[in-house]
Image (cartoon, rainbow, N blue to C red):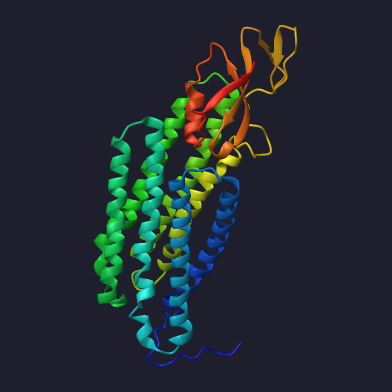
């Protein structure tokens, strides 16, 4: 291998200045590919979602597409068009300066969705309002950082440290609050249920909540740590260019998880009990093979939804408290309010 020749005027750590921008985009492309698959699944499987929810998904996807395009333009300007021009190392163009505001917009949109989810489960406005307020503050700081960076350039980027702390630290804090709140709500609901299948579903929901919530929290914290640990290079650009896509994938992973938790088009039925009733035997069978006393009545209902879509569900009527199932349904955005019995 030929010896490396240092070009006069080029910083010795040039790889740590331009390299992170390239790596951040490459990792971002991978996450964007995952996001495309998730949006495709959502588009085909959940056509009956409310208009506002579908609008949120497609809007977040659109903004993330714009972020990907702007990141690509930035790399192209720095490594192709601006190759050999040292001014590109100290002054970023407008495509990159727009990324903080757009990234903050995506994270705030996802936070708002989880605020709605917490409100749906608790019917309390206090916690969702507090979370939404913190999320708006972090978005405002992200917007401010993007606008000011146009004027001060890369050499003075350290002047934005207080605002970066509020931006990234606030985002991580909001993610942590959402995760802890959702886990507490689901754990409290699951602990009151005497049905092992309900407990199993709650455990899976808690696991999904922790995984998605901690992913975005850790991503924001890593970017914040890199920003302070490497003040003389651009290492913090790697997690920065991935963060918005982590939030987008979190939103889609949460919505698409309904395939596993009772969607009618999943590979397994959503019924708590199988339609296996022993005629005249005084009992009926469950999936585990246990016998249920005849004091419990088996009812099959048809759930009628928008556009005459029909679903078949098997529910149990008796002495049990259905409040925990209601928490499960709400936590997975399943609306059974229009259910009407058609056969006993």
Q: Is residue 66 left or right of residue 144?
A: right
Residue positioned 75% across, 11% down in the render: 279
Residue 190 in sight from this viewpoint: no
In the image, is residue 153 above or below residue 44? below
Residue positioned 41% across, 50% down in the render: 110
Residue positioned 60% across, 41% down in the render: 259
| Quadrant of the frame with the C terminus | top right
Residue 98 position by quadrant: bottom left
The percent coordinates of residue 258 (x first, y second) are 56, 40
User: Camera-side residue: 239 or 292?
Assistant: 292
Q: Is residue 66 left or right of residue 282?
A: left
User: Camera-side residue: 92 or 69?
Assistant: 69
The percent coordinates of residue 207 (x first, y second) are 52, 39
Residue 148 position by quadrant: bottom left
Residue positioned 43% across, 62% down in the render: 63
Residue 310 in sight from this viewpoint: yes
Residue 115 position by quadrant: top left
> What is the tally of numbered marks visible in this picture?
0
Residue at the extreme front:
308
Residue at the extreme bottom:
8
User: Camera-side residue: 186 or 58?
Assistant: 58
The percent coordinates of residue 114 (x first, y second) are 41, 43
User: Camera-side residue: 73 or 235?
Assistant: 73
| Quadrant of the frame with the N terminus | bottom right
């Amino acid at each position: 291998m030929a010896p490396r020749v240092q070009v006069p005027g080029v910083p010795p750590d040039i790889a740590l200045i331009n390299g992170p921008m390239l790596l951040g985009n490459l990792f971002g492309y991978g996450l964007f590919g995952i996001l495309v698959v998730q949006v495709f699944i959502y588009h085909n499987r959940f056509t009956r979602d409310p208009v506002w929810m579908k609008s949120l998904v497609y809007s977040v996807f659109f903004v993330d597409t714009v972020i990907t395009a702007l990141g690509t333009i930035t790399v192209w300007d720095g490594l192709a068009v601006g190759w050999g021009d040292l001014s590109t190392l100290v002054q970023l163009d407008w495509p990159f300066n727009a990324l903080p505001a757009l990234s903050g917009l995506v994270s705030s949109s996802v936070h708002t969705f989880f605020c709605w989810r917490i409100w749906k489960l608790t019917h309390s406005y206090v916690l969702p309002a507090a979370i939404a307020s913190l999320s708006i503050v972090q978005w405002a700081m992200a917007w401010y950082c993007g606008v000011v960076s146009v004027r001060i350039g890369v050499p003075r980027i350290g002047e934005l440290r207080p605002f970066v702390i509020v931006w990234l630290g606030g985002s991580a804090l909001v993610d942590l609050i959402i995760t802890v709140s959702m886990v507490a709500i689901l754990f409290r609901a699951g602990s009151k249920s005497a049905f092992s299948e309900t407990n199993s579903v709650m455990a899976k929901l808690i696991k999904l909540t922790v995984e998605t919530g901690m992913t975005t929290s850790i991503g924001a914290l890593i970017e914040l740590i890199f920003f302070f640990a490497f003040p003389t290079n651009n290492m913090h650009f790697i997690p920065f260019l991935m963060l918005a896509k982590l939030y987008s994938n979190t939103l889609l992973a949460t919505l698409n998880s309904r395939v596993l938790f009772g969607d009618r088009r999943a590979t397994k039925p959503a019924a708590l009990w199988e339609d296996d009733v022993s005629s005249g035997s005084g009992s009926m069978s469950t999936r585990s093979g246990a016998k249920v006393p005849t004091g419990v009545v088996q009812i099959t209902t048809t759930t009628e939804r928008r556009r005459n879509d029909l679903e078949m569900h098997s529910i149990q009527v008796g002495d049990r408290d259905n409040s925990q199932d209601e928490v499960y349904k709400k936590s997975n955005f399943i609306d059974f309010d229009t259910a009407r019995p058609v056969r006993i």
